[in-house]
Amino acid sequence: MLAEGLQFPHPVPTQIATVTSELVRNVRQYADHGELELRPLTSPLGIEVRVTDHGPGIANLNEILAGRYRSQTGLGLGLLGCRRLMDGFVVHTTPGLGTCIVARRFISDPFSAN
Ligand SMILES: Nc1ncnc2c1ncn2[C@@H]1O[C@H](COP(=O)(O)OP(=O)(O)OP(=O)(O)O)[C@@H](O)[C@H]1O
Ligand SMILES: [Mg+2]
């Protein structure tokens, strides 16, 4: 609803909802509980999805983001898929302390000259 209100074109609000759902699902699955923050961005216009937990952290993040990870619990493609759907995708994680993922999508391409 927030993405629709910001006038993201179809099907971007659905993509953002999919990313939000997957990141929250991971928190429920691997870290038990955490926090979700959704906020509009103004310059450039867009949306930020921030998911934070104090679970076990992700020790093998590089392997996962390189597509070399074999998951015991799922397809092992959730984080990679989220990254592809967003313009910015940063994972801060420390084993034993937790994980914070900040994913951003902009209304127009922030890197284009127009
Ligand atoms: N918030 C988290 N805290 C701790 N570990 C995590 C967290 N999110 C992901 N992981 C770890 O990263 C791995 C990859 O996550 P990813 O979402 O890419 O795949 P998956 O959840 O295994 O499978 P699926 O494709 O069904 O999402 C997980 O298997 C899990 O070990
Ligand atoms: Mg997952």
Image (spheres, rainbow, N blue to C red):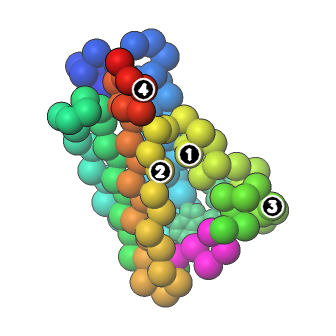
**Type of the residue with mark 4:** Ser
Nearer-the-camera pick, 91 or 5: 91
Q: Which of marks 3 and 2 precedes in the sequence?
A: 3
Query: Is residue 76 shown left or right of residue 46?
Result: right
Ligand 1 contact, mark 2 (Cβ < 8 Å): no
Q: Which residue is mark 4?
A: 112
Q: Which of disc 2 and disc 4 is earlier in sequence? A: 2
Instruction: Please indicate, yes or no, whether residue 77 appears anywhere in the rendered image.
Output: yes
SS for tag 2?
Answer: strand
The image quadrant of residue 26 is bottom right
Specify the quadrant that holds the C terminus: top left
Q: Which residue is mark 1?
A: 83
Q: Residue at x 44, y 69 (%)?
A: 92
Residue stretch in magenta: 57-61
Secondary structure beneath dot 4 equals: loop
Residue at the farthest top position: 10
Q: Nearer the viewer, mark 4 or mark 1?
A: 4
Pair 4/2: label in front: 4
Residue drawn at x 23%, y 19% as measured from the top left: 5
Label whose residue precedes the other's in the sequence (4 or 1): 1
Q: Amino acid at mark 2?
A: Phe
Q: Residues within 10 Å of mark 1 (few under 14, many from 20)?
A: some
- Kindly indicate whether the residue at mark 1 contacts the one at mark 2 (C-beta within 8 angstroms): yes
Check residue 59 for magenta coloring. Answer: yes
Location of residue 48 with respect to 66 vertically, above or below = above
User: Local crowd at mark 2 within 10 Å, few (<14), some, or many (≥20)?
Assistant: some
> Where residue 12 appears, x then y in whole percent?
45, 22
Q: Which residue is mark 2?
A: 89
